[in-house]
Image: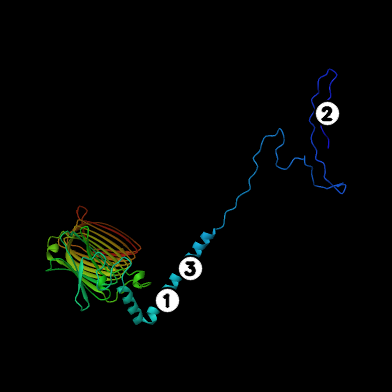
Amino acid sequence: MTTPTTPDESHDGSIAQPTPQPTTAQPTLQNGAPTPGTTGPDAPQPGASQPGEPQQARPQPMSTARKGTPSTRVIVAVTAAVGGVALLAVAASTAYSSVMPERYDAIDAFVGSAVDFDGSEGPGGAAPGSEQLVDDGSGTVTHFAPIDEVRSLDVEIAGASFDVAFGDVGEAELAVTGDRAANWTLAVREGRLVVETPDRGFTTGCFVNCGSGSLGDASGTLTLPQSMMEDGMLDAELSVEGGALRGSGSFRSLDVSVQGGDIRLDGSAQNVEVEVEAGKAELELADVGTAEVGVEAGSVRVTMTGAAPDRVSVEASTGSAALDLPEADYRVDATAELGELDDRLTKSEDSKHVVTVRAEAAKVVLQ
């Protein structure tokens, strides 16, 4: 190894500064011979900065993404197990109800009579929100609710038949027969009279095919005081899913929704809105001011009598709609794509009675 020379004194007595010399690595001797590829302790190391050279950032090793922590793997495994159990329960429920329907119905009735998780009771106790009920022992349960503050009616029927009527009663009366009759709801909520069929979810023993007939032969009849119909100021929202609804009355606004069932109504209404999905609705109403009709894979027939409506709109797709309107001149704006439009109305561009139709792959009849 070459070392820097020792400073010598010059002839004039000054000390000469040493000249730095490059340092070379000496090979390490092994058995008296140099070992190839080895360097001495003074040799520059790879990546190390040399004197006089600017400091450079040392490259950092790239981090690799962690594959899942043990807790994550446990959560995934538990989720998969729960999903498998649910699918097995669905398959078992379907098979058992098909092979042994009598025993399945008995189990369903037993589960339906049990106390629900929210504290509501089965037969012999009122459903959540119901005012009061009476079981006469003949299979009919009658629910009662006051109507002093009621301004609207909200009915949701699923898997049962239902009737709406007006009569000589002092309060709302709901008479129910069939499975889980005590679990129907009749209650007043913020000025709305609410009627609901029992929940058909997991706790009722219904896993699949929870549509039409899931409550067996259950049926209900709601009777309202005659005075509520005479003033014509009642708003109503009627919804059917896999069931049937019949009724008559005088309404200020009427909102009808059908999903896999059917509704038949007659009476009068100032404003009407009908929405049908895979079902059927038939309405015969007098003195309608405005009407909105929507159809998807279902059918609607609306017959209007009395004064001609100011505005009627129809939107139909893959279904059918038929409107029978009072005799008058109408201004019609109608388009149909991949469907059929049968327009038999008397037309006038100056008419204040406007009919708008938008149909796609559907049949619409105006007459």
Q: Is residue 14 left or right of residue 278?
A: right
In this figure, which residue is indicated by the disc labeled 2? Answer: 6
Q: Residues within 10 Å of mark 3 (few under 14, many from 20)?
A: few
Determine whether, in the image, residue 348 is placed left or right of residue 297. Answer: left
103 w.r.t. 118: above or below: below
Measured in 3D between alpha carbons, the distance from the residue under mark 3 to the one under mark 1, in whole angstroms, is 16 Å
The residue nearer to you, when weighing 309 against 201, is 201
Label 1 to label 2: alpha-carbon separation? 98 Å
Give coordinates of residue 202: x percent, y percent.
Answer: 36, 69
Tell me if label 1 and label 2 are in contact, CB under 8 Å.
no
* Quarter-of-image position of residue 271: bottom left
Q: Which residue is mark 1?
A: 92
Query: Is residue 64 visible to us here?
Result: yes
Scheme of image coloration: rainbow
User: Which of the two marks, 3 or 2, is nearer to us in this view?
Assistant: 2
Q: Is residue 306 above or below residue 52?
A: below
Residue where numbered disc 3 is placed? 81
